[in-house]
Image: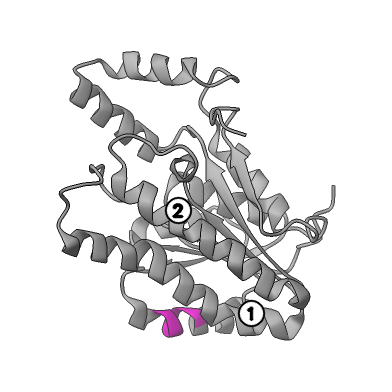
Amino acid sequence: MDLGIAGKTALVLGAGGGLGGAIARSLSREGVKVAAADLDAKAAEATASALNGGMALTWDLADLSSIDGHVKAIEAKLGSIDILVNNTGGPPPTTASGQDPAVWQKQFQAMVLSVIAITDKVLPGMRAKKWGRVITSTSSGVIAPIPNLGISNTLRASLVGWSKTLSAEVAKDGITANIVLPGRIATDRIAFLDEARAKREGKTVEQVIAASTGSIPVGRYGKPEEYGDVVAFLASVPAAYLTGSVIRVDGGLIPSL
C-alpha cells in the first residue's frame, strides 16, 4: 500500500528510544523527512544517521522556552511539519500516593504540557496546508492502570482526553489526532520495568518475562518495528478518516473492550 506521505516532514519526539526510534525508521522508509528529537544527543544522532535525510535535535521537553527555536530549525532544514509524533519518556516507577508535588509538577511539564505546547506550535502550519497528523504515544496504563506506575498512569491518561478533544477541533482542517497505546514492546524501557518488578517481587527477570508473555494472547513481546508501522499508517493518506481514536498495539494484552 502506498501511504502517500513521501516528501512530507515529521517531528518524532523521544526518537532516541526504542519506540520513538522505530517510529522514525518506519516513517523514513515511506519517504518522510524525519526530525529525530531526544534529550540524549547521542541517541538522537544514532537514530537520525539511520534515516534517509534525517535530522537530529537535542531536545529537553521540560524546557518549554526551546520549542520555538527547535521548530524553526526543522522548518529551515526540512520544511514545515506535517506529522507530529508526541512520544515522551516514561517517569520513574512510583506509587500514586506519597509523591512530592514537585515531582508531579516536573513530570507534568515534561510529559503533558510539552506535548500540548509543541502541538499548538505546529498546528497553524498544518491548518494552512489543510493537512496534518498528530499522533500521541502513551501507555496501556491509560486503560488498565499498571501497578507501581502511578505517575505514568495518571499523566498519560490526561493526554487521551486532550487528544480526543483536539481531534474534533481540527478535523475540518484535514488534521487527524489519534492516540497509540503500546503493550509489552521489547524495548529498553520494558527491560528496565521487568528488572524493577523482579527486584520488587523477589523474582528472577526470567520469571517476570514468563509471567508477562503468559498474559499476552499472542504469546510474546511486540517488536518495535510492529509499533512503528502502525504509527506510520496513522500518519498516512489512507488513514484520513481515522481520528479521535485510541489504537492498541498490544498483542491482545489489554483485557477490556
- In the rendered structure, find residue 79 and report the number of the disc placed on it: 1
Residue 54 in view (yes/no): no
Residue topped by disc 2: 157
Q: Amino acid at mark 2?
A: Ala
Query: In the visual, does 255 lie left or right of 154?
Result: right
Nearer to us in this view, 150 or 31:
150
**Would you identify the image quadrant in which residue 109 lies?**
bottom left
**Would you identify the image quadrant in which residue 241 lies?**
bottom right
Q: Position of residue 82 (x, y in %)?
A: 66, 72
Query: In the visual, does 149 lie left or right of 80?
Result: left
In the depicted structure, whether residue 214 falls above or below residue 123: above
Disc nearest the viewer among 2 and 1: 2
Nearer to us in this view, 103 or 32:
103
Q: CA distance from mark 2 to mark 1?
A: 32 Å
Magenta segment, principal secondary structure?
helix
In the depicted structure, whether residue 53 falls above or below residue 215: below
Residue drawn at x 35%, y 49% as measured from the top left? 152
Range covered by the magenta-colored residues: 67-71
Query: In the visual, does 208 lie left or right of 51?
Result: left
Q: Residues within 10 Å of mark 1 (few under 14, many from 20)?
A: some
